[in-house]
Image (spheres, rainbow, N blue to C red):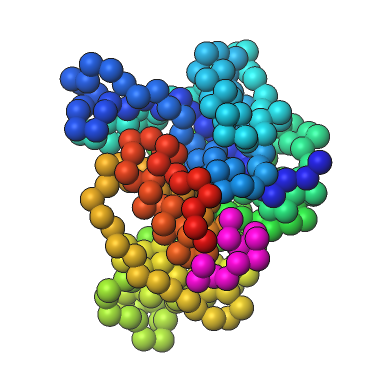
Amino acid sequence: MSYDLVALGETMLALAPAHGTSMRTAASLLVDHAGAESNTVVGLARLGLRTAWVSSLGDDAAGDRILDALSKETVDTRWVRRDPQRPTGLMLKDPGAGVRYYRTGSAASAMGIEVLDGVPIADAGAVLVTGITALIGPGPHAAGLALLSSARGLRIVDPNLRGGLWGSDRRRELVRPFIERCDLLLAGDVELGEILGAGWAGRAGWAGRAETAGGSGATGDVATGEELARLASALGPREVVVRGNESIGVLAGGSWTSIDIRRDAAVDAIGAGDAFNAGYIAVRIRGGTIDAALRSGARCGAAVTTSVSDTAGFPKNPAP
């Protein structure tokens, strides 16, 4: 059995008030699911690709609900393990207070390389893992590295740097090995600057600003997206996507391609990066051009921001 893409990562039960209300005053909450990798595979499935998601969930009602939801999206969940000792993680989205995670001690935070047993990784067209998996625990970190090492198809990584997790204080150290093992890197400009380190952190934010000359890393310069991408490509990826506030660019085959993007008022911007990734990956897996992939990603990312859900707004089979 082969898949277009196999993804590894944690998915949580997500609770959010309706748009325009707060967690404190809402009479009811939207019950949903959220996770960087599963958000992406849902998008890919809606675009007609065959996907599988590998993880661990608690043996609880929250885990049941997540499995039901992903199965309805035609995501294959047969390799998801159930942990009778640990719960499914929880995410609270509150417009007034931001996002809170309750995932310490979750089933996924304790999963290790054993979750990959029997998964047809080598036969998959692509694999996906994000830096969140690298940061939620030592076992998931090892599993992410094993996924990338076992893959024979396209290896995709989104750094997705996050605070408040097991490995957040060492996130550059923990996520960088994922990048060194990937073929396609999809990253935000600011987090890419942090990963590159050595004076690059804090110099990202390239769109619409003066570009640095010569890439010296001197204080006061602003790193361009292309500059960040070329530095990142030296770590191993052969294709690097850099998402900025006003533009998104790609370095591939030594050439830089970029498009301007418009950020309209969003109901909820969470999940937009995952949706962009799905739109971009779908086109590239099918052999489409970088320009077409960028436009597909931008369209899918914008669509998701129209809903409180991380995935509900993702289009089904949008025009290429």
**Among the 4 quarters of the image, the one containing residue 86:** top right
Q: Is residue 299 above or below residue 66?
A: below
Place of residue 112 in the rendered image (x, y in percent of width and height, measured from the top left): 68, 33
Between 245 and 107, the one nearer to me in the picture:
245
Position of 28 with respect to 165 (left or right) is left
Would residue 78 appear left or right of 133 to someone viewing this image? right
Q: Residue at x 32, y 27 (%)?
A: 16
Q: Which quarter of the rendering shows the N terminus?
A: top right
Residue 67 in which image quadrant: top right
User: Between 7 and 32, which is closer to the camera in this rendering?
Assistant: 32
Q: Which quarter of the picture shows residue 234?
A: bottom right
Residue 40: x %, y % from top left = 53, 45
Is 285 covered by the magenta stretch?
A: yes
Horizontal and vertical percent for residue 211?
33, 80
Percent coordinates x, y for residue 13 in the rendering: 46, 25
Nearer-the-camera pick, 37 or 143: 37
Answer above or below: position of 233 versus 318: below
* In the image, farthest residue toward the bottom: 214
Residue 28 seen in the current view: yes
Q: Which residues are magenta?
A: 282-292
At a point 27% along the width and 36% down the height, the residue shown is 98
